[in-house]
Image (tube, rainbow, N blue to C red):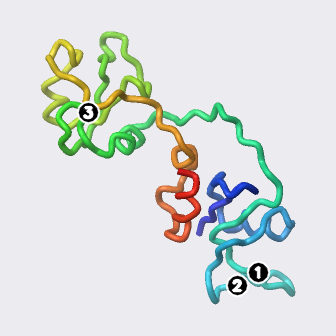
Amino acid sequence: MRTLVLNAGYEPLTVVSFKRALVLVMNDKASVIEHVENDPVVAGRNAYDRPVVILLTRYVRVPSTRRVPVTRRGVLRRDEHRCGYCGKSAATIDHVLPRSRGGGNSWENLVACCLRCNNAKSDRTPQEMGWALRVTPRQPRGSSWTLRGAERGDPRWEPYLALAA
């Protein structure tokens, strides 16, 4: 079981194990906002609510230069599994400037791509093919991208994640 941690300003910070969340609550560093009904954790003589969402008591400053790592899954998610060239369903990624020509693995050089367009393009640029990108590839922004594990989280997290979007 995992727990969403909110900063003192109610912005999502991270996802931690329920044990780590319980330690933060027991040490008065956080308070439980959402919990599992009728399933308390008994520790010694005390019973604690099993946390789903906790709020830190003190504000934690988050560096603004937090970079989102480039991954295949991330590129597909950013482009909503739609081909950057034709708009059909995408299952692969493509380098806009091919690696054979010096193109790197960066958010600005990768797009989601359907298998048909990927095979047709091969190691050419979109300009050589006479194609245009539907959108300009950019690094994703927002807490939903820097918050690891939130995409597979508890449905009770959604109101708190929506506040940050």
Residue ID at (70%, 36%): 63
In the rendered image, residue 39, in percent from the top left (x then y), is placed at 65, 86
In the rendered image, residue 163, in percent from the top left (x then y), is placed at 57, 57
Q: For the residue marked with disc 3, what is the amino acid? A: Gly
The image shows residue 126, relative to residue 160, as above or below, that is: above
- Quadrant where the N terminus sits is bottom right
- 99 sits left or right of 138 in the view: left
Marks 3/2: CA–CA distance: 48 Å
Q: Contact (CB < 8 A) between labels 2 and 1?
A: yes
In the rendered image, residue 125, in percent from the top left (x then y), is placed at 23, 16
Q: For the residue marked with disc 1, what is the amino acid? A: Tyr
Residue ID at (35%, 27%): 136
Q: What element does badge 2 sit on? A: strand
Q: Residue furthest bottom?
A: 38
Query: Mark 3 vs mark 2: which is more N-terminal?
Result: 2
Q: Nearer the viewer, residue 159 or 66?
A: 159
Q: Nearer the viewer, mark 3 or mark 2?
A: 3
Q: Contact (CB < 8 A) between labels 3 and 2?
A: no
What residue sits right under mark 2 in the picture?
40
Query: Mark 1 vs mark 3: which is more N-terminal?
Result: 1
- 105 sits left or right of 57 in the view: left
Q: What element does badge 1 sit on? A: strand
> Mark 2: few, some, or many residues within 10 Å (few <14, many ≥20)?
some
Tell me where residue 23 sits by quadrant. bottom right
Q: For the residue marked with disc 2, what is the amino acid? A: Pro
Which disc, if any, is residue 48? 1
The image shows residue 13, relative to residue 70, as above or below, that is: below
Marks 1/3: CA–CA distance: 49 Å
Which disc, if any, is residue 84? 3
Residue ID at (62%, 57%): 15
Marks 2/1: CA–CA distance: 5 Å
